[in-house]
Image (cartoon, rainbow, N blue to C red):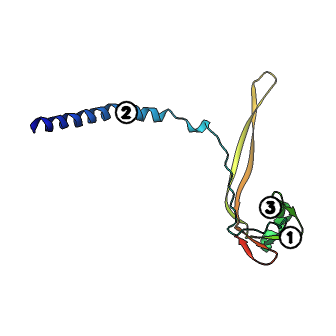
């Protein structure tokens, strides 16, 4: 029984030695991968849980907003950004109604950015510099959409 026991010890020692020698190679191989050079695009589609009637071909969009957002609606025109490919958009009374509710516009952060530009003469000698400043403001607002058909049946949030 003793020879069988010593054979297992040697096998485990060989396994540990093998792992000890190959682990650094795996670590170095992983450091050479540059993921920044690979780019890809992703599209996401959320389909409704309720099956739509195959005769539905039109839709309309209703926008509800707060008084604070009303002044921005002309510039944003969110009803134009809702498109269903293969469907005809109507001003009202479509087979599907998409009701979009926009919340208040809230400033999250602001900062003053600076850009300096050097001025050179015709010979390439620096004669001065110009500094430009602009303010950067980040806004956020809440929004949700409810989709229902012309019969009033809820399709999707």
Relative image position of residue 137 (x, y in whole percent): 71, 57
Q: Note whether 135 is above or below 38 in the view shown.
A: below
Query: Which residue position is annotated with label 3?
Result: 82
Query: Which residue position is annotated with label 2?
Result: 24
Residue at left offset 82%, top offset 75%: 150
Task: Work out which residue is located at the far right of the displayed protein and give it.
Answer: 91
Determine whether the residue tagged by mark 2 lies in a helix, strand or loop. Answer: helix
Mark 3 Cα shell of 10 Å, populated few (<14), some (14-19), many (≥20): few
Residue at left offset 55%, top offset 35%: 34
Front residue of 109/24: it is 24
Distance between the alpha carbons at the discs numbered 3 and 1: 14 Å
Q: Quick one: label 2 or label 1, which is nearer the N terminus?
A: 2
Distance between the alpha carbons at the discs numbered 2 and 1: 64 Å
Relative image position of residue 146 (x, y in whole percent): 73, 71
Distance between the alpha carbons at the discs numbered 3 and 2: 53 Å
Q: Quick one: label 3 or label 1, which is nearer the N terminus?
A: 3
Task: Work out which residue is located at the far top of the displayed protein and give it.
Answer: 123
Q: Quick one: label 3 or label 2, which is nearer the N terminus?
A: 2
Res 7 → quadrant = top left
Front residue of 130/16: it is 16
């Amino acid at each position: 029984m003793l020879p069988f026991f010593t054979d297992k010890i040697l096998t485990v020692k060989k396994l540990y030695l093998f792992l000890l020698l190959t682990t650094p190679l795996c670590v170095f191989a992983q450091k050479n991968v540059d993921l920044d050079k690979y780019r890809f695009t992703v599209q996401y589609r959320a389909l409704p849980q309720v099956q739509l009637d195959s005769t539905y071909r039109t839709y309309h969009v209703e926008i509800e907003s707060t008084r604070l957002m009303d002044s921005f609606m002309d510039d944003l025109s969110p009803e134009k950004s809702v498109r269903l490919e293969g469907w005809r958009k109507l001003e009202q009374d479509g087979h599907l109604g998409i009701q979009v509710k926009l919340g208040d516009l809230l400033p999250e952060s602001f900062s003053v950015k600076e850009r300096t530009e050097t001025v050179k003469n015709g010979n390439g000698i620096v004669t001065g510099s110009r500094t430009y400043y602009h303010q950067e403001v980040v806004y956020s607002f809440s929004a949700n959409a409810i989709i229902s058909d012309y019969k009033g049946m809820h399709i999707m949030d």
